[in-house]
């Protein structure tokens, strides 16, 4: 089995999600059969996170996800794309209500507010549906947890089915991997050729 590791220590912006997608596409074209997605993210773009989660569940690569410290907001939907999900002992997951920023000097009408309200409802249902399917829960229960801003530590995540195991991530010595940093920079790493 060919395995690849991708560490994401960043918000899920459009640029970062694009880099993740390119890495996954590269893994598929190079014949990797398993991707370990190591996450620590405060969340980010709801639309990008939902799209990434859907894509991860559709690829012909086995996806394993690991929470390195904090997976919050839309990051949980991405995390739930893993067929096997783990987290560090000292980690957390935070669900919260979907929010939409309003720009300065924006003219607000009833129609505008009604549209934004509907957008929040749809995004909330989509996120809750992804998480609910992963934890074999009901979407309504997940929506309730989102609305009251719920934080799970590693034990809570295990007991509710968000993770399959609490474990330290120990990387094999000779692996191919990439990392996306908080500033959005992406670097690729290959095992050193020691002549053997």
Image: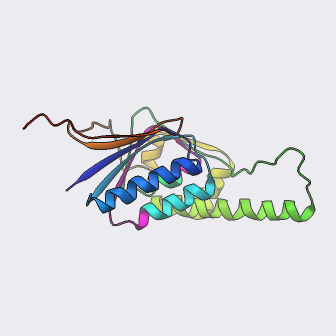
Q: Seen from this angle, which residue lies furthest top?
A: 90
The picture quadrant where one finds residue 81 is: bottom left
Q: Is residue 23 found left or right of 182 in the rendered image? A: left
Identify the magenta region: 57-76
Say which residue appears at 56% left-offset and 59% top-offset: 50
Q: Can residue 136 be seen in this view?
A: no
| Residue 68 drawn in magenta | yes
Residue 46 is situated, as x and y percent measured from the top left of the image, at 62, 55
Residue 118 higher or lower than 158, as above or below: below
Tag count: 0
Q: Say whether residue 20 is visible.
A: yes
Residue 117 pos. (x, y %): 79, 60
- Residue 145 in the image: x percent, y percent? 62, 51
Whole-percent x, y for residue 16 in the image:
52, 47
181 or 159, nearer to the observer: 181
Q: Which residue is depicted at the point 65% across and 55% down?
A: 144
């Amino acid at each position: 089995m060919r395995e690849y590791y991708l560490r994401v220590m960043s918000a899920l912006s459009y640029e970062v999600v694009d880099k993740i997608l390119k890495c996954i596409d590269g893994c598929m074209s190079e014949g990797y059969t398993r991707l370990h997605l190591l996450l620590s993210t405060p969340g980010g773009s709801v639309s990008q996170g939902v799209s990434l989660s859907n894509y991860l569940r559709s690829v012909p690569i086995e996806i394993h996800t690991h929470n390195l410290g904090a997976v919050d907001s839309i990051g949980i939907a991405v995390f739930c794309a893993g067929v096997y999900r783990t987290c560090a002992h000292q980690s957390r997951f935070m669900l919260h209500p979907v929010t939409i920023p309003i720009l300065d000097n924006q003219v607000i009408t009833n129609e505008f507010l009604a549209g934004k309200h509907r957008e929040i409802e749809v995004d909330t249902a989509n996120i809750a549906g992804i998480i609910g399917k992963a934890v074999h829960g009901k979407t309504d229960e997940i929506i309730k947890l989102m609305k009251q801003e719920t934080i799970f530590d590693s034990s809570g995540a295990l007991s509710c089915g968000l993770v399959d195991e609490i474990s330290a991530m120990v990387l094999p010595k000779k692996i191919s991997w990439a990392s996306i940093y908080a500033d959005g920079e992406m670097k690729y790493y290959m095992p050193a050729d020691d002549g053997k």
